Amino acid sequence: MKNILLIGAGRSASCLIKYLLDHSTAENWNVTVADVSLELVQQKTNNHPNSRAIAIDINDEMQREQEITRADLVISMLPAFMHMSVATDCVRLKKHLATASYVSKEMAALNDEAKAAGIILMNEIGLDPGVDHASAMKIIDEIHEKGGELTLFKSYCGGLVAPESDTNPWGYKFSWNPRNVILAGQGTAQYIENGKYKYIPYNRLFTQTDMIEMDGNRKYEAYANRDSLSYRHFYNIENIPTMLRGTLRMPGYCKAWNVFVKLGLTDDTYKIEASDTLTYRELMEAFLPQGKQTVKEKLIAFMGAEMDAETLSRIEWLDLFGDRKIRMENASPAQILQDLLEEKWKLEENDKDLIVMQHQFEYMLNGELKKINSSLVVKGEDQTYTAMAKTVGLPLAITAKLILQGKIKARGVTIPTIKEIYEPLLQELETYGVQFIEKHS
Amino acid sequence: MKNILLIGAGRSASCLIKYLLDHSTAENWNVTVADVSLELVQQKTNNHPNSRAIAIDINDEMQREQEITRADLVISMLPAFMHMSVATDCVRLKKHLATASYVSKEMAALNDEAKAAGIILMNEIGLDPGVDHASAMKIIDEIHEKGGELTLFKSYCGGLVAPESDTNPWGYKFSWNPRNVILAGQGTAQYIENGKYKYIPYNRLFTQTDMIEMDGNRKYEAYANRDSLSYRHFYNIENIPTMLRGTLRMPGYCKAWNVFVKLGLTDDTYKIEASDTLTYRELMEAFLPQGKQTVKEKLIAFMGAEMDAETLSRIEWLDLFGDRKIRMENASPAQILQDLLEEKWKLEENDKDLIVMQHQFEYMLNGELKKINSSLVVKGEDQTYTAMAKTVGLPLAITAKLILQGKIKARGVTIPTIKEIYEPLLQELETYGVQFIEKHS
């Protein structure tokens, strides 16, 4: 028997737990699922004979060590900043670890020790980062193998809502951490275009968007991610002249979100005094120049040419000109906005979310310009088995299986840019409907 | 004999040192001036018989303790973040301290200990903060004493350049820390207007300006400072409906500076790779959307209605469309901009700088609305005895004298909002030409 310890049983873990339990008999696994909430774990493991449900306090060193000692492999679904105590224990106790988070500096620093301990610290093995690395690297390696030279790589991803559940004018509902959506893009986006570095500061990030087509003729809007440059190194395309990573939204979303950016409503660096005494209209007013017009009229004047009827209707739909009271006291503008959006953009019980990803490649082969578009569309089943949970959880689960089967030889801090991981991973993902469609031209 | 220890002999200390030495015989002072650079100290003390010039390493605990032990009063002109080791020593060794910096949390925490030690930790006793507190508080107290109720207080200050030295289209030269000018306003400006909080995020701070008139008919432009709200507490006007503090620039400056903000050139949070391989035109290009036009044409299109001929001429005057190479490698956009501006906006040897300050008050007295405008204009003598050095240094020097003469009874952490300080301070400042002109209406 092999023992798997999964820490963290929140929304994104549902497909992961299902996979582990479904394969537990054939693979001879005992699966321990641990979370602060025992109830949540019991609900997700549902008395499966190969499961063990426990409550865990991740700061209890004794319990943590005891549980990791029992395990052959640990999967951490904790928030990224909490991985390190688990990772350090894994190295010391010589246990494999898998997470869906970005490699932090602290994690990277464990590389040599992890190699010496003969274990893998598998990171960035969810959707984005995760499936994006695997699927991009497969094509990049293929192009390189046949002697092609990459001249362009653009990669877009979005966690959206399926057309049949798209019931609000923003085309958006939360399928993951709302806070990340509110604060998305703060800083300066950096990418490279025709050999020249390009920078887009936050104040105009949502006004400089690209349009992407996918999934039949469906159009998506893309804004640039903060960091596109560091990926050149991981993907072995250091000298590529054009490289951009972006986030997808439904058309119109970015123009409307830009209203919040320009007003200052996404700022999380200070608190609004006694915010619970204000209505949302008064909040809007606090960010608008003085004047005798209504708040709506002032907003229209304030946005000038950047305002149109559709954008205005999106703002109105959120009741931002109404008498609704703010519920949070002494909260930042970003927190106040999040509280409202969590209600307005809630994924309802029978709603289906949607994951869309597209990689665009251009390369020169024998003096000819070639193009590849590789697209992924995954629809969720319901509020529990979301496309997000599927595309984050399955890569973790499948890779955990490959590690336990001894099929992955890599040790130390690893991300899925290597063939021995991405090849079997992408193959098995296809059987779950997570399949990229390639168009060559 | 009383011993004064002055730590820090940089540009802002010249008038301070002159005052201390000029008064040393009459007041029976020995003045020790300490700086990292002995040469700088010797140049400024110029072998004055009551002076002692020393080099100091502020991190050398032994030397620091030895020098503070000798002193009756310490003046710290160190950068704000370096005050604390001096302040802690002063409390332990029971020596008075004066600084021109804002009261930090750490400084505030020393209040009880300083009172127990019987010493004053005098802070915010330069120009802004300093003279602004003293001059505003004088009028606020007068209004309160005659039973008036303040309804509006706006306070503006700018460190600019005298009309006869105003030789560039920006109307600006550096008379103090350039870095603070580049990063000015980042965050969100907060103030109150007619009883309602107002917020202006950085992305439009320089587009929402007021116009102020002073010094004959000279006009100045004002943008809001980050924090106007906390001053209500210090000035004992907690319930004032309108309160704003702002920074003054010459008309047109803000509109042109907004180009840098919108482009993203004031960002100090990331480095531009190999920035020393770029020209300033290429830097501009990196922040502008792709296109076949010249950088200048693209900038005009990019700014749209926000660009006019004067604004464009200010940008052009900085050689931002030219082939000039960037000198700094892997520098942030803000650092690159600062390096250029330090050269372009240098205060030349015979240039005179200019300090302008204006307080606007409105109050109700016996059912009548009254107004007071109180304005200060100070012109520098040259590059050494600048108006900035005068208005920062004299309040420190005069207050040090008052403390040593036993005329200030306050102990603990103090700022010049109390009568026993502001009254004699403002009186003596007038004899140096630092005089507010009041207009009542």
Image (tube, coloured by chain):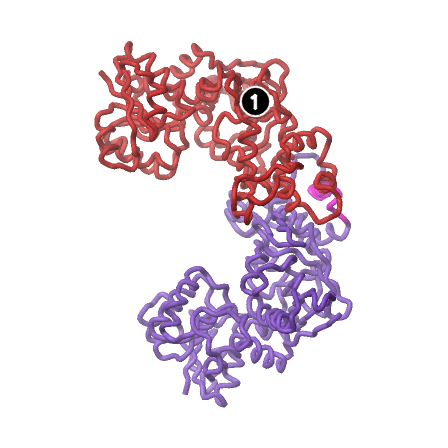
Chain colours: A purple, B red
The residue nearer to you, when weighing A35 against B335, is: B335
- Residue B54 pos. (x, y %): 28, 25
Decide: few, some or many residues near mark 1? Use Cα within 10 Å; few <14, some 14-19, many ≥20: many
A297 in magenta: yes
The residue nearer to you, when weighing B253 against A440, is: A440
Q: Quadrant of the N terminus of chain A?
A: bottom left
Relative to B82, A428 lies left or right: right
Q: Residue at x 34, y 67 (%)?
A: A60
Residue farthest to the bottom? A26
- The kind of secondary structure element at disc 1 is strand
Q: Quadrant of the C terminus of chain A?
A: bottom right
Corner quadrant of residue B288: top right
Q: Is residue B296 above or below residue A372?
A: above
- Residue A388 pos. (x, y %): 59, 70
Q: Is residue B157 above or below residue B288?
A: above
Q: Mark 1 sits on what residue?
A: B362
B31 in magenta: no
Q: Tell me the kind of residue under disc 1.
A: Glu
Q: Residue at x 53, y 35 (%)?
A: B339
Can residue B153 be seen here? The reply is no
Q: Which residues are magenta?
A: A295-308
Query: To which chain does the residue with label 1 belong?
Result: B
Q: Is residue A303 above or below residue B437?
A: below
Task: Count up the numbered dots.
Answer: 1
- Residue B181 pos. (x, y %): 53, 33
